Amino acid sequence: MPDPQQPRRLSLPGRPALGYHLHAGAGPTIVFLGGFASTMDGTKASFLDERCRAEARAFLRFDYRGHGASDGAFVDATIGEWRDDALAMLDEVVHGPCLLVGSSMGAWIATLAARARPGRVAGMVTVAAAPDFTELLLRPALTATQKADLARQGWTPRPSRYGDGPYPIGRRLVEEGQHHRVLTGPIDVPAPLRALHGLADPDVPFGLSLRLVQAWRHPDAEALLVKDGDHRLSRPDDLERLADVVDRLWRQVRA
C-alpha cells in the first residue's frame, strides 16, 4: 500500500516526472500552484492541505519540474514548461472543475493554465501575484555581472532574502518568459478572481495584483490588500485570511 506521506509521481513520455499530493473530497478541487523556487511542502500549501482535509475537500499540490520532489534541473526550466506541468496536473490528475490558488509566480502559471483550460477553472485566488515577472522585475534588476554570466555560461546566481538561496537563474527562463506575458491586454478567463497582496511586499509590487484584476475580463474580480503584509503572507493571520478567501470563493463557485 502506498505511503500517504510520500508524494505520488506523474510520469508522461518525454517529460520529467512530477511529484504531487492529492486527496479526494468535495469539489471543485483546490489546486495550489507554488512560487518561484518554492515547493509543495511550503507553509501556504501545507496549511491549505490540512484545512481541506479537515473539511473533506479535494486538494492537489505539486512540484514543477526542477522543484522539490519532481525531476528536472531548475536552472534549465522555463515559464512555458512550468505552465505545461500545471496543465499536465489538470489533464491527468484532477477530474472535474478546479479552483486555482497561485502564489507569486504561481499566479502567473495559474493565469496561463486558466487561459488554456477555461472550461476547467471555476475560480482563482492569487497571493502576491507576480505575472510577467521575468520581464517586469527580473530582467530590469540584472546587474552587468549577471548579464555577462547569462551570456557566457547560460545562468547566474541570484541571492534570496529568505535564506534559501542563492538560486540559479537560467538564460532560457529570462528569454522565454517574454513569450508568455499576460498583462499586455485583457485576460479572458470566465471565472471570478480574488487577488491578495501585502502593501509591504518588498519583492513584488502590489500594483501587479491591481493590474491583474484590471485586466481580468470577468466582472467578479477583487483585490484584497493587507496593509502590513509582506511577500510571503504566511503569518498565522495571513494564513487564516487566505483560507477564508479560498473558502468563500469555493462555496460561491460550488453553489
Image (cartoon, helix red, strand yellow):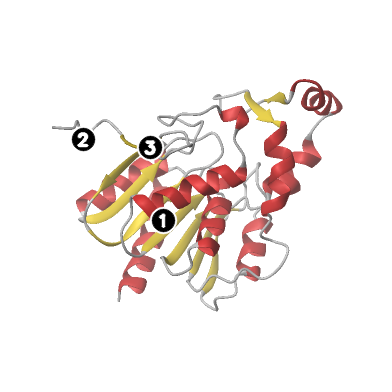
What residue is pinned by disc 1?
241
What residue is pinned by disc 2?
4
At label 1, counting other C-alpha atoms closer than 10 Å, the crowd grade (few under 14, some 14-19, many 20 or more) is: some
Left or right: where does residue 126 sit relative to residue 144? left
Nearest-to-viewer mark from 1 and 2: 2
Left or right: where does residue 46 sit relative to residue 64? left
The amino acid at mark 1 is Arg
The amino acid at mark 3 is Ser
Please tell me which residue lies in front, 121 or 206. 121
| Residue 36 in picture, x, y percent from top left | 56, 38
What whole-number distance in Å separates the C-alpha atoms at marks 1 and 2? Answer: 28 Å
Nearest-to-viewer mark from 1 and 3: 3
At label 2, counting other C-alpha atoms closer than 10 Å, the crowd grade (few under 14, some 14-19, many 20 or more) is: few
Q: Earlier in the sequence, mark 1 or mark 2?
A: 2
Q: Are marks 1 and 2 in contact (CB under 8 Å)?
A: no
Please tell me which residue lies in front, 83 or 186. 83
What residue is pinned by disc 3?
11
At label 3, counting other C-alpha atoms closer than 10 Å, the crowd grade (few under 14, some 14-19, many 20 or more) is: some
Mark 3, secondary structure of its residue: loop
> Which label number is shown at residue 55?
none
Quick check: can you spot residue 95?
A: yes
What whole-number distance in Å separates the C-alpha atoms at marks 1 and 3? Answer: 35 Å
Query: Which quarter of the figure has residue 221?
Result: bottom right
